[in-house]
Structure formats: structure tokens, C-alpha cells
Amino acid sequence: MSAHRWEGLDEFVAVAECGNFLRAAERLRVSSSHVSRQVARLEERLQARLLYRTTRKVSLTEAGQTFFARCQRLIEERDAAFLAVGDLQGAPTGLLRMTAAVAYGERFIVPLVNEFMARHPQLRVEIELSNRTLDLVQEGFDLAIRLGRLSESRLVATRLAPRAMYLCAAPAYLERYGRPHTLSELAAHNCLIGTSDTWMLQDGGREHPFRPSGNWRCNSGQAVLDAALRGFGLCQLPDYYVLEPLRRGELVSLLEHHQPPNTAVWAVYPQRRFLSPKVGQLVQALKTGLAQRAEYQALVV
């Protein structure tokens, strides 16, 4: 295959995955006019229309769908070939784009990424902290840190750390309002609501969703913890927020036999036959770094 016959493949695949020319151009770090021109030339060489274009959306034609599936495999094999020739244990280089939830990212992930960057200054990193579940493929991310349970089958996941949820309250609150002993008693208590409208518990081996209600709400785990320590009500928070207060007796763990099954902290990335060295090494650094954090070494109550 002559070199010019490869031209336009990366642009076409990016448009097909992103759904429009602008996002494809942002991913490839070129102009949208360049992407449009390369795809048009590719269609001209193939003598086939690959994309339906409207002002809002781009979709694949039947020929485009067939060509897209083959092109994805070609590009993955090409990239894998370059990786195979290079030293996979060499220093990570280039740009790595990643995303994580705001609070967890600020507290746990970004400091570890900064340590990794200090060891590998030739690497460039872009981190987007967002509580939205971003589309890694369409938005061109190499890596995301996700909390809880995973549902996206298109992504590959590596478990970084455990994540157990605790239902708890301050002793002062329990002295005033009593301690719940059954799930049915929760409705009578003031609940401090964070980012989720539903608390997951366990009853007889099955998940038991509970919709908390109360006079306080904030989309910050640290703020929920502060309100709980002040005796405002019950809270459900991940282990890394509450294990130390539980150990010190500032909070009391409730309904332990109804605690939901442990979830996890995950590193997720788009399905690729080979994981790039920069992503693989950072994921290992995050896993090692989280295991050394005091929050994950606190005694489980």
C-alpha cells in the first residue's frame, strides 16, 4: 500500500467515533477543515461516500460502517506495531489525557499524578476533574478514574483500591434521636444527602435501595462528613472519609450487617489490544500510591 492510501484513515476513524468534525479535530489537534479535507480526499480515492453530513451530526453510510470496522483494526495494529518496536519499559512520553471525579481527584489522584510527572518530566498530562461520566472515546481521553460499579462494556478496567460504603452518625445525634436497628427505621431519621439520591444497602444478600430524606444536602463528601460530625444526622460515605473518625469514636457505624457489598476505585480506558506504556505505568503508580495512603491503611471498624 502506497503511503498516500493511508492518508485520511485517522481522520475518518476520529470523525466516526466522535460523531462530528469539530470533536475529531480537537482529538487529533488539527483544524476541522483539515479533517474535512482529508476525509473528502479519502472518499474520492475510494469512489464511495463514507459519511452522511448534516449541520448538527455526522453518521456512517453502509459503506462507511464496513470501512470503519476495518480501519479501526488497521489503526490498532499499526499503533501496536510501533509499540512493539519501542521499549515498552522506557520513559513515558507524549500527551496523556485523563479524567476523574472532582473531590476524589483533588484529594487522591492529582497528587499521585504530580508525583508521577516529577519522575517523568517529558510526559504531558491534561486532567479534567468532572462529576459527569465523560465518554472516553468521543472526547479523546486515555484514562478515567471511576468510583463504584462499572457499567460500560466498551471500557477495560483495572481495580486500583477498595471502596466500602459506611452508614454512620455522631454519638451526639444517636443520644438524642436513638440508633436505628432495622432498615425500616431509617425513614424516621434525618439523613444528610450528598451526591446520590439513593443509598445502597443490603438485605438478605440482595441490594436494598433507600431514598434518604432530611433537611441538609450538599454535593461534597467532605461537607457531608462535617455535618455528620456536628450531629446533624445520618450519612452514608465511602471508607476513606470515615474510617479515621470511626476509629476515634467521632462517628458510630450503623446497620453493619446491611452494609452493601464493596465496590471499588477503578482505572478505566478504551478497549485496545495493547495498553500504551504511559497509561500502563501511570495506572500502576496510582495503584501503588493509593495503597500507601493513610486513608486506606486505617483500621476497619
Image (spheres, grey):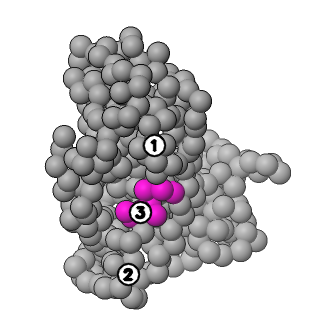
Viewed as shown, does residue 34 lie left or right of 247? right
Residue on which the image places disc 2: 117
Residue on which the image places disc 1: 230
- Residue toward you, 262 or 97: 262
Looking at the picture, which amino acid does disc 3 mark? Arg
The residue drawn where x is 48% and y is 56% is: 103
Q: Residue furthest right?
A: 55
Label 2 to label 3, Cα distance in Å?
17 Å
Label 1 to label 3, Cα distance in Å?
22 Å
Of callouts 2 and 3, the N-terminal one: 3
SS of the residue under disc 1: loop
Q: Position of residue 116 (x, y in %)?
A: 33, 78
Of callouts 1 and 3, the N-terminal one: 3
The residue drawn where x is 55% and y is 55% is: 130
Viewed as shown, does residue 125 lie left or right of 252? right
Residue 186 vertical placement versus 135 (above, below): above
Q: Which residues are magenta?
A: 102-109
Q: Which corner quadrant of the image does residue 218 belong to?
A: top right
Mark carried by residue 107? 3
Which secondary structure class fits the magenta region best?
helix
The answer to whether one can see residue 44 in this image is no
The residue drawn where x is 51% and y is 39% is: 194
Looking at the picture, which amino acid does disc 1 mark? Arg
Viewed as shown, does residue 49 lie left or right of 115? right
Quadrant assignment for the C terminus: top left
The answer to whether one can see residue 97 in this image is yes
Magenta span includes 108: yes
SS of the residue under disc 3: helix
